[in-house]
Image (cartoon, helix red, strand yellow):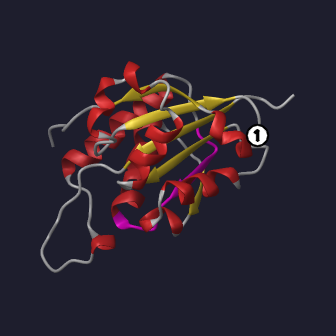
Amino acid sequence: MTPPRRLLVLRHGDAASPPRLPDDERPLLASGTAQVRWAGRLAAARGWQPEVALVSPALRTQQSLEAFCAGGGHTPQRRIEATLYQGNRDALAEAVQLLPDRVGTAVLVGHNPAISGFVLGLGADEVDRFPQLGDGMRPGMLAVLSWSGGWDDLDSASLVEVAWAGRQPA
């Protein structure tokens, strides 16, 4: 029998929007770093230690992963997935479904609107239990999906937790 899978879905934290800076080079703000550090601490407190991190190549997602790991003492193997930058929810699902069977818990760090569509689509039956998802995945928000079976059984996932620290002070 295949052990249960857990996917931590993290939207990058608040990011700067300086003029004339390419979108993929936008850095995290101090508040964004605090948001994702908080999410990393929460994951560690729940015993969720990701073995693999799927992350967009954009600077703000890379920095979000670093802060998440620093917050919770996580040391996942990092996999930069170009399709997570401007891909849709299907691209996110495809990246997750390619994870090896030996992985039990993974974290995916990405962008809206794909990340909201991904979580809301998979967790549609449970969304009413999480009113904080009313506006989709906000910066620094963590959603947790769980299911039995392999990574390719992702379409049967349940949304088990949604957490958001809000806009944290610098």
Q: Percent x, y for residue 167?
A: 18, 38
Three-letter code for the amino acid on which mark 1 is drawn: Gly
Q: Is residue 15 above or below residue 37?
A: below
Extreme residue in the right direction: 1
Quadrant in which the C terminus appears: top left
Question: In the rendered view, does 60 fall on the left or right side of 154?
Answer: left
Extreme residue in the top direction: 129
Residue at (43%, 47%) from the top-left corner?
117
Mark 1 is surrounded, within 10 Å at the Cα level, by few (under 14), some (14 to 19) or many (20 or more) other residues, namely many
Q: Is residue 49 above or below residue 45?
A: below
Question: In the rendered view, does 82 fall on the left or right side of 51?
Answer: left
Please name the residue that numbered disc 1 is placed on: 150
Q: Is residue 41 above or below residue 70?
A: above
Residue at (39%, 58%) from the top-left corner?
61
Give, as a single range, the part of the protein colored magenta: 50-59
Q: Percent x, y for residue 111?
A: 38, 56
Extreme residue in the bottom direction: 20
Question: In the rendered view, does 18 fall on the left or right side of 161?
Answer: left
